[in-house]
Image (cartoon, grey):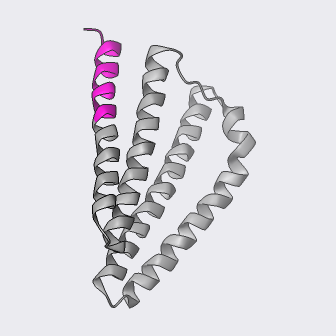
Amino acid sequence: MSKVDEMVDVLRQWQGIERQAMNDTAEIMEKTTSPLIRVIMEIIRHDSLMHHRVQQFLIDSVAKESVTVTREDIADVWDKLKAHDLMEKKTIQMAQELRKKAWTPVLKLLLDYLIKEESKHDTLIEQLDVFKKDLGRSSGG
């Protein structure tokens, strides 16, 4: 089995697991009246949908057409990305301050979730910055 075939095979299996997770969370949501459990299942369901989309993107990038990103692609949106990253950092700081003041387990749980999610977004933008710098070095820019 080639590297591409193996990658596609594993990603397709993973997509099946994500589809099952979406079904499972929907069933759990139908069976509960707990607002906390419902919101957690909604979060997981949404994440599973996004994972499925990213997995399909990866499949397409290795099986159909590889993804290319130019310096111009990044340069065209870099100022907006930097501004967005500043907002992400601000929301992380806000959530951390709120977390210190949280007095119930529910508040703490969901604020911890939001901090991790916003941090994840911040990390993705930081990784784009590294990618941008690597593009500049590899192209002599």
Q: Is 30 above or below relative to 141?
A: below
Taking the spot 55% from the left edge, 24% from the top edge, the residue there is 67
Residue sitting at x 44%, y 18%? 62
Picture quadrant where residue 132 is located: top right
Drawn side of residue 77 relative to residue 90, left or right = right
Residue 69: percent from left, percent from top: 61, 29
| Residue in front for this viewpoint, 9 or 81 | 9
Task: Point out the image quarter for the C terminus.
Answer: top right
Q: Is residue 8 magenta?
A: yes
Is the magenta region chiefly helix, strand or loop?
helix
In the rendered image, the vertical position of residue 52 relative to residue 33, given as above or below: above
Residue extending farthest to the left is 1
Residue 100 in percent (x, y) is at 38, 86
The answer to if 75 sits in the magenta stretch is no
The residue segment tinted magenta is: 1-16
**Horizontal and vertical percent for residue 25?**
31, 53
